[in-house]
Amino acid sequence: MKDTLTKWSIALRGGKRRDLNTILQLAIGAQDRSAPEQMDWLRSLARYLRGERDYRFTPEARTHLLLQRLNQHPEWAQAAGTVIAQVLARGSALRIFCEAGLPSSASFTQELLGRLIRSVLPPVLSEGSLSGALQQVFAHRGDDVWLERIPGSEREALVAWLQASIPQVRRDGLIQEMAEGIWLLANRTTAIALRDDVSVRSPGVGPLAAHPMVLLEDEARDLATSVAAGGRPDLGALLEASAAARTFLDGVLSQVEARGVSVDLVFQIERANAYITRMERLAGVIAVVRDPLAGSSQSEAVWGLLTELVRGELDDRRPGHVLTQSAHLIARKTVERAGETGEEGIARSNHDLRHILTAATLGGAFISLTALIKYIGPKGLAPFFEALYGALNYGGSFTAMHFLHLKLATKMPAMTASALSSRLSPQPEPDADREFVATATAILRTQIAAVAGNLAGVIPAALLLDAVIAAAGRGHLLTADKAAHVIESVSPWASLTIPFAMFTGVILWIGGWAASWIDNAFVFYDVAGALKSQGGLRVRFGEKRVHAVADFLSRNVGGVAAALVLGAGLAFAPEIGRFFGLPLEVRHVTLVTGSLALAVAALDFGPLALGAWSSMLAGIAAIGVCNLGVSFALAFGTAVRARRMPTRRGVALLGQTALSILRRPLGLLRVPAEHEADLASGA
């Protein structure tokens, strides 16, 4: 058994490990071998240069040793060069130049699926293409890194050895394939620019013949024709056309950001930009190689292209790479929409703070009705219908609060964190850092006021509702046993309240994120514009009413979506958890406080042990901190990553905010006079 496992382990690592002398000696016999056997030899050479965990020397040192052996043994140098030349002669590098590291599928879904499959299956040697050969030789993560670390002098020596080994005809063929790759990439870029979803967002470009992408394709065709004729390409004309094409794509991107984004559209724009970058890279290499006075810059250009292609082939086998690239703008735009909403909820003055406190107090009173409806609901329902009842209760309540302009503290962190991240500068800047600290302090001040208002409103409102129901002769809303269970379930040291409260914070973050995404989709698909331009609606209801409804939806779709998603999450998450055998529950600080008030009332305000009171107070505090803290942390972290800001900067500035608060703790209760004066003066 041990021998079998050892053999499998050796096979998976590429066969038995050989020393350099043995590898170079085997090159003599490999000249007359089949293509798979020559690939095995080439992989063994790359494996030696790459090294393994217990190798004594670095790849740089092993490359230096390889050059020494090639100089000392011309027969080895000739044999090894011949094998490499034979491998290169068996196929075209066109696919490598056009697709290595570039999205090649027509849609984001197809590209992601293709990379998922390639990440599992081993690379295949295809007839007539060198793509599989490159993937097999450089198949390990980090191969591009050690290639980049090879010193310049040794790169030049390796390239010179390869140039001497590869026949001139094949070298010219590789250059021609680069030129054809430029032409093919230009053709693909034009096809992307003429797609319906891109062209409708394109700035005015006049007739098709004057389209920047068509002009770029014309220049690429001229370059390929010039290279085929043996001339030097006009690199300046191609670069000028590519700059105009990039300007065109930037114009499309600005329209996309103004009108909402989609994954597939962003994927197409990123794809076109990547094609243009590769075209410029290939054209630069052709120009240098065709320049007899280029000298050592030829080897640098060739080696740099090889490293880029190896990195690209490795990235082609990483699904997360394309997902990260294309999802970046989606995340950033969604974060920006959340931030726009969050800006409106930050109290910048004491007047704003009083307004937040009032709206939150009324919101807390309204939540007591939500708790009432929760407990008077029908009993004995199937789990799905019980969760549906809860979703309608929560979602309906939160929606009503949105239209009544009432505040729910736990909905705010996901929005305000996005607004805060917009103040984050990549590098330390005194003015920007002060603005960040001031905004963070204002957010925390606003959040404290909102939580205090919610709790101050829900407790007396819940007690009043219970008293009214009891006065009507229907008894307390909760039984004594139920009240005792409610009190016990909130204890942070006798239950799983803290994990459940953190889980609820995740739900709150998802609700805010989903609302921003739905708001973005509403803008991207121009739902308001579709309603306004619908002839039947205008005839039936009148243009003025249709426009009013469309504008109403534009203003409120995000808030209503947040309410419904949050309500569904709070209601269905526990049932989904139980479906998978997980005893999940939610702990929402305002709802829990309302339930505790009803529980205390159900016990007729009877004597409760000091431990019960302390567990209730500690439970409310822990739930509030976990709800708000987890939601804020997830939203802030997402916003920082979406803007491609360094996470350490965000953490460091949050630390500066904490120090500022410790110096002036009263700033959490009211806006300092100097800040109000700055606001009044417009500073």
Image (tube, rainbow, N blue to C red):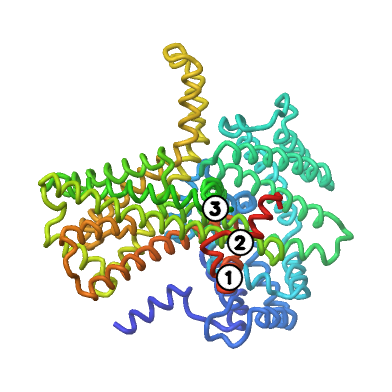
Viewer can see residue 334: no
Looking at marks 2 and 1 on the same chain, the residue that comes earlier in the sequence is marked by 1
Above/below status of 649 relative to 463: below
Q: What distance separates the C-alpha of mark 1 from that of mark 3?
A: 18 Å
**Mark sitting earlier along the chain (1/3):** 3
Crowding at mark 2 (Cα within 10 Å: few <14, some 14-19, many 20+): some
Q: Quadrant of the N terminus?
A: bottom left
Judge depth for marks 2 and 3 and give the one in front.
2
Q: Secondary structure at mark 3?
A: loop
From the top left corner, tell me how far across and down residue 184 is, in percent. Answer: 65, 42
Could you say whether the residue bearing mark 1 is in a helix, strand or loop?
A: loop
Q: Amino acid at mark 3?
A: Ala
Structural distance between the alpha carbons of marks 2 and 3: 12 Å
Local packing at callout 3 (Cα closer than 10 Å; few below 14, some 14-19, many 20+) is many
Residue 174 placement, left or right of 324:
right
Residue underneath mark 2: 672
Q: Residue at x 35, y 44 (%)?
A: 398
Residue receiving disc 1: 664
Mark 1 packing: few (<14 Cα in 10 Å), some, or many (20+)?
few
Give x and y (percent) for residue 140: 53, 69
Query: Mark 2 falls on what kind of element?
Result: loop
Mark 2 to mark 1 CA distance (whole Å): 10 Å
User: What residue is disc 3 on?
Assistant: 347
CB under 8 Å between callouts 2 and 1?
Answer: yes
| Residue at x 27%, y 42% (from the top left corner) | 392
- Identify whether 379 is placed above or below 633: above
* In this picture, residue 393 sits left or right of residue 63: left
Q: Is residue 580 above or below residue 529?
A: below
Q: Residue furthest bottom?
A: 56
